[in-house]
């Protein structure tokens, strides 16, 4: 019995430690999930108030262009509260009440004493009946000696059972006392044994429930981790879509500034930019508006589809840009064109320098000729003067 109580206390301690460990681990997962969900909600709101709103303003400034998602916007009340939906639909895990182990020693002693007194009273009642002792209710004994004198014939009667035909009151008292002690021990120990068995059973049940709760919380933790990983993937895709849409918003503003607001008069590449921005806006709105969690608390396959389509559109946009940037023929033609222009510029510069040199030489020759002619004229004039003289 002592061993059972000791084992029950040990099991209760193990149960308490298991519950605390499970709760601590689950709380860390829960906090991580709350942080991820909060980041998702904040990013979603920033996108709606940022690039999506800016695209709507740009689109409204463009005429002759129809967009299927025109005017489709969402308020905070219309958007999904991922945390609330997930935890509302998650299975309820009831807390476990750890039992308090009490050996029941004190109550066992009390019960043993009660049954001992009852056995003594039973002996006295039986003795009164057997000895036909008459007790006057109006003249009850007031002292212990008076009581012993009244009960003496009863004790002698039971003493004769111990020592036939030669029993005394002492023998009877020993018999009654001994039987009463045995009865008290039997009932007291029975109570203690029952309490010990119950303690062991209750502690084992509590440990079993704690282990079941741990398994349930493990399943819940797996769902939480799946939700966290998925929201991170959604966050990354939303962030990338947002960056692209911001870039295209800037391009559309430049188009509106340089080409006007009539979509039909835009250059083909400008029309393509506007349509690509519309695709980005559509994928953002669709991904944001599709619930992540289903009514059963599972990840929504429709949101998975929206995420997959958004990622596919991003790859298409990236590949389209790379085709323009990495087209070898295009690059070679551009470089050849640049080289031709460079050669033409060099030729023009060389021709210009040659023409300038020729002009300088001609001017110098002309100046020399003029000076020579002037010198010859002056010489002739001097000779004529001398002849006349």
Image (cartoon, helix red, strand yellow):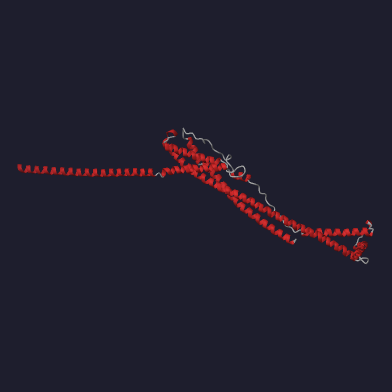
| Front residue of this view, candidates 385 and 372 | 372
Residue closer to the observer: 223 or 140 = 223
Q: Can residue 339 be seen in the rendering of this structure?
A: yes
Left or right: residue 291 compared with residue 319: right
Q: Quadrant of the C terminus?
A: top left
Q: Is residue 389 left or right of residue 131?
A: left
- Quadrant of the snapshot with the N terminus: bottom right
In the visual, does 238 lie left or right of 83? left
Residue 375 locus on image (x, y percent): 12, 44
Q: Nearer the viewer, residue 320 or 174?
A: 320
- How many numbered markers are drawn? 0
Quadrant assignment, res 296 = top right
Q: Quadrant of residue 378?
A: top left
User: As drawn, is 359 to the left or to the right of 179?
Assistant: left
Residue at the location (22% across, 43% down)?
358
Q: Position of residue 189 (x, y in %)?
A: 79, 60
Check the image and report above or below for 135 versus 37: below
Q: Residue at x 15, y 43 (%)?
A: 369
Q: 31 and 369: which one is in front?
A: 31
State whether residue 140 appears in this view: no
- Say if 229 sits above or below 132 in the image: above
What residue is shown at x 76% (from left), y 57% (from top)? 195
Residue that appears at 55% across and 47% down? 230
* Image location of residue 50, percent across then percent down: 51, 41
């Amino acid at each position: 019995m002592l061993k059972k109580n000791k084992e029950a206390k040990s099991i209760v301690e193990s149960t308490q430690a298991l519950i605390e460990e499970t709760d601590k681990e689950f709380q860390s997962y829960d906090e991580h999930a709350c942080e991820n969900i909060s980041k998702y909600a904040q990013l979603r709101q920033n996108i709606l108030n940022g690039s999506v709103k800016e695209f709507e303003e740009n689109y409204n400034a463009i005429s002759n262009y129809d967009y299927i998602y025109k005017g489709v916007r969402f308020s905070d009340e219309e958007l999904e509260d991922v945390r609330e939906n997930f935890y509302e639909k998650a299975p309820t895990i009831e807390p476990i009440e750890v039992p308090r182990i009490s050996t029941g020693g004190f109550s066992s002693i009390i019960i043993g004493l009660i049954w001992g007194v009852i056995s003594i009273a039973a002996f006295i009642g039986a003795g009164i009946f057997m000895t036909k002792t008459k007790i006057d209710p109006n003249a009850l004994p007031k002292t212990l000696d008076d009581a012993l004198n009244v009960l003496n014939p009863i004790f002698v009667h039971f003493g004769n059972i111990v020592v036939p035909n030669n029993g005394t009151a002492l023998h009877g008292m020993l018999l009654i006392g001994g039987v009463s002690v045995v009865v008290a021990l039997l009932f007291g120990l029975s109570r203690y044994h029952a309490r010990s068995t119950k303690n062991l059973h209750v502690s084992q049940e509590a440990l079993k429930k704690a282990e079941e709760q741990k398994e349930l919380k493990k399943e819940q933790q797996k769902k939480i981790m799946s939700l966290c990983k998925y929201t991170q993937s959604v966050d990354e895709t939303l962030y990338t879509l947002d960056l692209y849409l911001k870039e295209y918003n800037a391009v559309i503003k430049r188009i509106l500034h340089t080409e006007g607001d009539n979509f039909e008069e835009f250059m083909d590449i400008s029309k393509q930019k506007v349509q690509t921005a519309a695709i980005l806006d559509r994928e953002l709105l669709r991904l944001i508006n599709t619930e992540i969690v289903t009514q059963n608390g599972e990840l929504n396959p429709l949101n998975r589809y929206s995420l997959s389509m958004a990622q596919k559109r991003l790859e298409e946009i990236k590949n389209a840009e790379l085709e323009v940037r990495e087209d070898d023929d295009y690059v070679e033609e551009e470089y050849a064109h640049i080289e031709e222009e460079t050669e033409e510029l060099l030729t023009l510069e060389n021709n210009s320098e040659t023409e300038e040199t020729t002009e300088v030489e001609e001017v110098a020759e002309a100046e020399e000729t003029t000076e020579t002619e002037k010198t010859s004229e002056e010489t002739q004039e001097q000779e004529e003067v001398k002849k006349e003289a």
